[in-house]
């Protein structure tokens, strides 16, 4: 079984993230969607809320196969997650060229930590490449329409927060 880890903040999960998940499931048998639980960052949603958003988006709004996706939180190295779940790859999403430098460095560090784990970069579809969690939160704060950026349950969570 080919397993990959898709780590991220997912604060909140967007259609861009979902595109990366869809593409990953064409390549891997199982995907571990791992949201960070790092106390050094200021998250808009708590880790429990982000897990709820991911579960509701993938399983309730979009009917993804629960057998193929495991959703977890983590506060250790992604490489350690790979070892725990016997994953051979880390999936990372790219939106723009500006993402590449950071992602390239991160992939290099992960390769130094464990040379057996590959990093795979996937791009979301063109219509979702401009979406960022930061912009989604700003649009929500200003009362804009979020339907083209996040799932229905995520819109509801955002409206409840504001």
Image (spheres, rainbow, N blue to C red):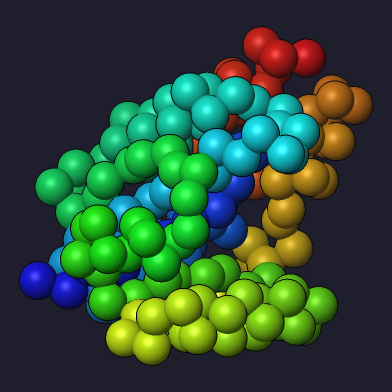
Q: Could you tell me which residue is drawn at 58 percent across and 86 percent down?
A: 108
Give the quarter of the image for residue 11: top right
Would you say residue 61 is visible in this rendering? no
- The reply, left or right, for residue 38 in relation to residue 71 is right
Q: Residue furthest front?
A: 113
Q: In this view, does 119 lie above or below 7?
A: below
- Report the residue at 73% width, 39% height from top: 41
Q: In which quarter of the image is residue 127?
A: bottom right
* Nearest the eye: 56 or 148: 56
Quarter of the image with the C terminus in it: top right
Q: In this view, does 88 lie to the left or right of 126?
A: left
Quadrant position of residue 129: bottom right
Question: Considering the image in quadrants, where does the N terminus appear?
Answer: bottom left
Instruction: Please determine whether, in this image, residue 148 is positioned above or below residue 116.
Output: above
- The answer to whether residue 52 shows anywhere in this view is yes
Q: Above or below — where is 79 with respect to 42?
A: below
- Comparing 155 with 32, the one in front is 32
- Residue farthest toward the right in the current orientation of the protein: 142
Residue 21 at x, y percent in the picture: 40, 60
- Residue 26 image point, x, y percent: 26, 73
Query: Which residue is painted at 66% across and 11% down in the image?
Result: 160
- Residue 139: horizontal and vertical position, in percent? 83, 35
Left or right of 74? Residue 150 is: right
Could you tell me which residue is drawn at 25 percent across and 50 percent down? 69
């Amino acid at each position: 079984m080919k397993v990959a880890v898709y780590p991220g903040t997912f604060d909140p999960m967007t259609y861009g993230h979902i595109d990366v998940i869809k593409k990953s499931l064409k390549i891997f048998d199982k995907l571990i969607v791992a949201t960070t639980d790092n106390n050094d960052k200021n998250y808009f949603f708590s880790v429990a809320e982000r897990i709820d958003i991911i579960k509701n988006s993938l399983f309730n709004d979009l009917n993804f196969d629960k057998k193929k996706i495991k959703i977890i939180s983590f506060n250790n190295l992604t490489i350690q997650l790979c070892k725990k779940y016997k994953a051979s790859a880390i999936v990372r999403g790219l939106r723009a060229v500006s993402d590449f430098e950071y992602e390239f460095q991160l992939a290099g560090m992960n390769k130094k930590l464990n040379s057996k784990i590959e990093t795979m970069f996937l791009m979301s579809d063109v219509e979702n490449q401009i979406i960022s969690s930061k912009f989604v939160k700003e649009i929500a704060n200003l009362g804009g329409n979020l339907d083209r950026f996040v799932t229905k349950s995520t819109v509801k969570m955002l409206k409840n927060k504001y």
